[in-house]
Amino acid sequence: MKIPCYFPSCFSSQPAIDQSRHDPGGHNDGNFRLFTYNELKSATNSFHFSNKVGQGGFGSVYKGRLRDGVFVAAKVLAVEPESMRGEREFIAELAALSDIKHENLVPLRGCCVEGANRYLVYDYMENNSLTQSLLGGEQNRMKFSWDVRRKVSIGVACGLRHLHEEVKPHIVHRDIKARNILLDQNFNPRVSDFGLAKLLGEEHSHISTRVAGTMGYLAPEYAVTGHLTRKSDVYSFGVLLLEIVTGQAVVDLGEDYKEHFLVEKAWEAYQTNSLLQMVDPILSKDFHEEEAIMFLKLGLLCVQETSSLRPRMSVAVEILTKTRDIRDVPISKPGFIADFMKIKMARRHSLQESSSSGPSSNYIWSPAKVGR
């Protein structure tokens, strides 16, 4: 995987740009473009609030129209000098997307460096994210027929398969969630926001890193140990798949004013043989029952407490496209952590067990110690 040599160093607040790598018109020798700040300012009407289409943990996203009439989405990343927050995410996105092309990954058109600010420019996605579309209210959910949900599910799985198994070194996204799945005008899904992505070499089964991601989608063993593997993304995909089929958010506040977690609800439905009741009622029975149940079972397979039992993304694609049957595959109990306080408690417990067992012991996370 190539990383453009003109992206800024994370140690420089005023990075030098290698002018030999792009022509006077602002294009490099590939498809990646180096934009000027004035271009993006003009395209977004000075980043006017009316053009703001998204807000993430690493910056705001604005819709813009370039001089050639092409619509783009410009992400503004403000760098915090002390922590270099923003700079790391900028470089992570460049490393992940500058040389990768796949129909289910958001296309990165280029970048811009202006003072302490970093700008990433993507193709504009007309139907925003799954959070705004599918989970944005009943009217929006009505646009998502079963065929659309199937297409979105398979597309996301294919995008992750590409990152996990076809790209070298492999890429672990670390923040798969509804907000990071964008939809074009035809509801084709694009995995986006690689600010937390990590490269995983072929010789490594996992890497240790600071825990980052979104509660509800975090694989519990990663949340507790900080050991990141591709199965961490698989867990997040399983949660996302449950959302797509049910039309429900990862966590909601019930009539009893208690938080109810989608993974728990799906597991209870599986145990009582009532998975069909989990399918989004907005579909009004206009869906393939056997296929919907199979999608829900795959979601539960992906969130099993034992990460080694979760399928690889290539297997998930086979299941979704009906080239692999899982009707008789046993599903074990899922694992999840409801809040960060339980993560801290589990880590403390992990350290205590490790020290008492000696330096060579390996702590194995158990949901009974952490779950609700």
Image (spheres, grey):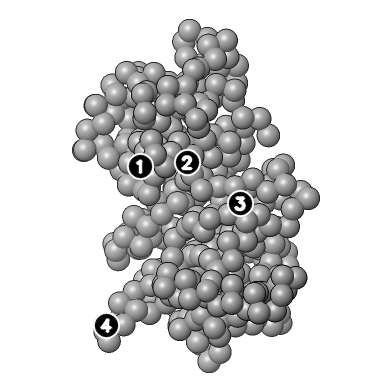
Q: Residue at x 28, y 21 (%)?
A: 42
Sequence-first tag of 2 and 4 = 2
- Labels 2, 4: front one: 2
Amino acid carrying label 1: it is Gly
Residue 99 locus on image (x, y percent): 62, 32
Reading the image, the residue beneath label 3 is 172
Answer yes or no: is residue 108 visible.
no
Out of 359 and 152, give the one closest to the viewer: 359
Reading the image, the residue beneath label 1 is 59
Cα distance in 3D space between marks 2 and 3 = 14 Å
Out of 340 and 66, give the one closest to the viewer: 340
Amino acid carrying label 2: it is Glu
Amino acid carrying label 4: it is Tyr
Mark 3: secondary structure: strand
Mark 1: secondary structure: strand
Reading the image, the residue beneath label 2 is 89
Cα distance in 3D space between marks 1 and 4 = 32 Å
Reading the image, the residue beneath label 4 is 257
Amino acid carrying label 3: it is Val
